[in-house]
Amino acid sequence: MVRRPVRRVRRGAGPRRGGRLPGRHPARGRGARGRLRGGGDGPAAVARRDLVNRKLQLLFFACGGALFAFFVARIGLPAILVNARQTGWMFLPLLLLTAVVYLCHAGASWLILADEPTRPTFWRLYAITVSGFSINFITPMVNLGGEPYKVAALSNWLGVRRAAGFVVLYQMLHSLGMVLTSLTALLLALLLLPPEPALRGAIAVACAGLLLITLVLFWAHRHGGLERLLDLLHRLPVVDRVARRFEASRPTLALMDEQITRFYHNDRRRFFLALLLEYLGRSLLMSEYFLILLSVGVDIGLPRAFAIGALASLVGNTLFVLPYELGAKEGSLYFLFPLVGVDPALGVYAALVSRVRDLAGIAAGLGLIWGTGRRRGAAPAPASTEAT
């Protein structure tokens, strides 16, 4: 009496093979094992994946260590020690400030991953964040070497496609936070720096450019932009050949666009909280020059330090082709410090101390690479995260 109705329910309960659930993607006939990512992975497949991840960790660590040694040699170990000694006890607050800045970035990443079925623990995500930024610092040309690393590290929980989507989404949010910080600094510069016509004209042009970038980034968060970017590349005669190579990835780009826009539309409060954390982290970093100058008895005030730090960062981001902002930070601070009545020689000193602080963070990030793999026994994420 019970089996016959149950068999009828089973036959009519769900969609047939290849059917579509309401609001879901096609089942694609993969069955129950296909609906769980890694459901068909045996111990050998898991071991191979862990071996690949270890090899990637070794590669990132070796390359990062080599570049780190190069930058230490270029600055000079004696110069690093002298500047650290002159900064004295203030070097500890600078390191704590860096840790808090990364805490804000990791918090924003944690909010982005809130809807994922599986994600790393917060402190593991913090380690991945520190390592990713450290690799970015020492990557030649575009300073984006940490993004492939984060994809590889997070793919253990999210899968490669969703990990790549997260990295693109976070980079967009991080860029938006940087732009808003720069706009704040430009407004402070208009109020606090000398009213020279050339300076005000440059600030006005920079404000216009940053406002345009802000609108583009907000539009991309609302509507996505990866597929549209591919369409744009097809229309450009020089890069059309490159666009054709990426055409096979259009479905993946569409899913990544969906992942980006869902974060904005599903929970606006979470989106703006993550953006606030990015803005807060970037703003805290701008106070480092206030602390550095205090260590030598010069007090320019937090607002002026914020403006100078953000303007120097804006110059460094404009010259993104330079690895580790070689020369850009020293040169920009040399010309910016006199605007607030500070000896330009202290600008070079502040840049060197900032580099020592950066090197300490880079060393910590490279060391944390070994702690960012999957925990033993961590459950793989469901396959629905790959398709939704």
Image: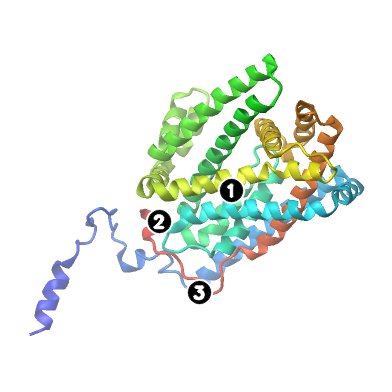
Q: Which residue is mark 1?
A: 147
- Residue for point 69% across, 60% down: 58
The front one of 276 and 234 is: 276
Quadrant in which residue 347 is drawn: top right
Question: What whole-number distance in Å separates the C-alpha atoms at marks 1 and 3?
Answer: 29 Å
- Residue for point 63% across, 17% down: 201
Question: What whole-number distance in Å separates the C-alpha atoms at marks 3 and 2?
Answer: 21 Å
Q: Which residue is mark 3?
A: 43
At label 1, counting other C-alpha atoms closer than 10 Å, the crowd grade (few under 14, some 14-19, many 20 or more) is many
Q: Which residue is mark 2?
A: 386
At which x and y percent is residue 286? Answer: 67, 41
Contact? badges 1 and 2 (CB < 8 Å): no
Left or right placement of residue 301 versus residue 158 in this view: right
In front of the other: label 1 or label 3?
1
Name the residue type under label 1: Glu
In the picture as drawn, the residue positioned furthest to the top comes out as 197
Contact? badges 1 and 3 (CB < 8 Å): no
Label of residue 90 in the image: none
At which x and y percent is residue 367? Answer: 71, 60
Name the residue type under label 2: Glu
